[in-house]
Amino acid sequence: MEYQGNILKMRTELDDPIQYQLPIGDELVNMNALIGQHIQFSFDGQINCISCGKKTKTSFSQGFCYNCYQTVPEAGADVMRPELSRAQYGVARDIKWAEEHDLIDHYVYLAVSSELKVGVTRHHQVPTRWIDQGASRAIRLAKTPNRHIAGIIEVLLKKHFTDKTNWRAMLQNQLNESIKLEEEKQKALKLIPAELQQYFSDENEILELHYPVTAYPEKVKSVTFDKQAEIVGKLMGIKGQYLIFDKNQVLNIRKHNGYFLKLSVNS
């Protein structure tokens, strides 16, 4: 089997285990079905911006050409730093886009991917955001009416919790099983000022996520098409937005948004 075209980050579906599909050209490839098989990705150097479609020599912010990186709302600074959102004041790169993405309910959450981390996501991105980060467990902490307020809460909590995922430990499945999310949620409540405690969520469901992995790498060797034209190996599993191959190789699919690839599958 062969597929070719520009790729985007894998689509996910909550299941046990999580189901993954890779958009490549006009196809959606069932990646779970390829686990245990030898696959090969080939890259001829073509990268297309995921916003305007133009060819670009360098991909910025996971898929944009430089012009789109500087102008489109999907690449704005508030995407990575929610506290910078000013849509509530009518200030945005594209106010219509902001109305649909910033001026909607957001969750502040606690998740365990290796250690405990705090994060922010749009309400409709639960549990996609947690899956993309490779979280094993997650709980909603606060629900806010816009992105800015969620970002402010996150900034305050970052003084006590990390907001980064240790991706190497996540891919090795090094989990701190002693973390009790409900207890950590109560601790977090006491760390934010009274005027923000009104957004505290009473949703205490802990979502557990299971990934389709047959073997985790003992060490992590990151591979990228920026350094090699072909990536070949036996697919051992998928976690977050990473493909895990034999020989400890891992490939970050999301990093290569817009890359034109050929995927070959050999049983």
Image (cartoon, grey):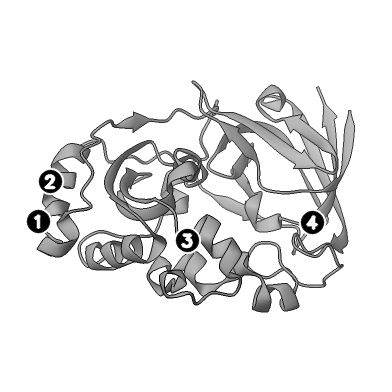
| Disc with the residue nearer the chain's start (4 vs 1) | 1
Residue sitting at 78 percent across and 59 percent down?
228
The residues bearing labels 4 and 2 have C-alpha atoms spaced at a distance of 43 Å
Query: Can I make out residue 179 in this image?
Result: no
x, y percentage for residue 98?
Answer: 54, 64
Instruction: Give the amino acid type for the residue marked by disc 3 in the picture.
Output: Asp
* Disc 2: which residue: 186
The residues bearing labels 2 and 1 have C-alpha atoms spaced at a distance of 7 Å
The residues bearing labels 4 and 1 have C-alpha atoms spaced at a distance of 45 Å
Label total for image? 4
Q: Secondary structure at mark 4?
A: strand
| Disc with the residue nearer the chain's start (3 vs 2) | 3
Q: Secondary structure at mark 3?
A: loop
Q: Nearer the viewer, mark 4 or mark 2?
A: 2
User: Which numbered dot is residue 259?
Assistant: 4
Q: Are marks 2 and 1 in contact (CB under 8 Å)?
A: yes
The residues bearing labels 1 and 3 have C-alpha atoms spaced at a distance of 26 Å
Q: Nearer the viewer, mark 1 or mark 3?
A: 3
Q: Is residue 260 left or right of residue 111?
A: right
Instruction: Give the amino acid type for the residue marked by disc 4 in the picture.
Output: Tyr
Q: Secondary structure at mark 1?
A: loop
Instruction: Give the amino acid type for the residue marked by disc 2 in the picture.
Output: Gln
